[in-house]
Image (spheres, rainbow, N blue to C red):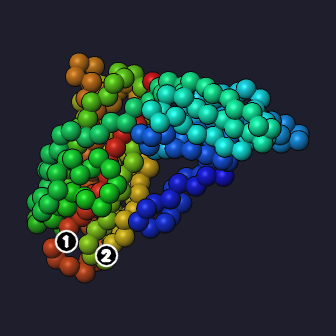
Amino acid sequence: MVRFLDSTTGAVLRTVSGAPASVSPDLQTMVTVSTTGADQNSASLFVVSTWTGETLALIDEDLSKTMRVDYSPDGSRLLHGSYLQMLSCFHTPQENYRRIVPDTLAVKLGKTISGSVSDLDRADGAGLVIQKFIVPNSNGPSIQFEVQGISPFLAPQSISMTCKAKIDTSGSFKHTIELWNYQIGSWDPVDRIEDTLTTSYKTFNFVAAGDLSRFVDPTTHRTRARLTLTRTGVVSKFVWTTTHDHFNWIVRN
């Protein structure tokens, strides 16, 4: 079994069955081995997304007694070695998914303290820091920003999002992620996620459902998300900030 861990907290984000395993040079996919059969001596190679854990391709060649599996340096081939002193080489299956990185940022509520849209690319500790907006209605949102990216697919079969964020003070907060529905011209009332936010980094995984073409502009291919932070209880500081270290979409054709 392979476990994906949050590099900051050590929390298990997802698990993928099978071993041994190897990660591709571009860090986008992982190949792992799953044993089959009553004697557990047969095996198949599974190529999975390192971002979602989703199985992208299967090489069902009835391989046996796996010792090691690995990618070629350019990622174009897979090498399988067994205890039977046999080597097998396969072309890496063509991925039918893409990672969308935000290229546009618009802060609607709050003040940008540091960082930019480029800091949302990867979870590396260099985040987008936004200070709360002093709102007349204390029950309303204090921080809100929108991000956009370009989807390579007009009608993706799946859309998932990964977000990693934290807040700099203790208290009660609600973190909301919404998607723009291009068919109705407003934020989608169904596909949204709400969760709490703490002073330690927390990772949110959000999978959209239904007709996913509604989230992609048919002309520009753009997809759009809105992230909102709302105070829901007592807060230890009057002025506080949030840090968003990572936000990406993963789309599959």
Say left or right for 128 vs 27. Answer: left
Q: Which residue is mark 1?
A: 240
Q: Position of residue 18 (x, y in %)?
A: 68, 46
Say left or right for 123 vs 19. Answer: left
Q: Position of residue 218 (x, y in %)?
A: 28, 19
Q: Position of residue 191 (x, y in %)?
A: 40, 41
Q: The C terminus is located in which quarter?
A: top left
Image: 86 above or below 140: above
Q: Which residue is mark 2?
A: 171
Image: 247 above or below 230: above
Q: Residue at x 15, y 65 (%)?
A: 131
Q: Amino acid at mark 1?
A: Trp
User: Closest to the observer: 26 or 73?
Assistant: 73
Label 1, residues with CA under 10 Å away: few <14, some 14-19, many ≥20 = some
Q: Is residue 14 visible?
A: yes
- The reply to whether discs 2 and 1 touch (Cβ–Cβ < 8 Å) is yes
Q: Is residue 184 visible?
A: no
Say left or right for 176 vs 10. Answer: left
Q: Quadrant of residue 251?
A: top left
Q: Amino acid at mark 2?
A: Gly
Q: Residue at x 89, y 40 (%)?
A: 38
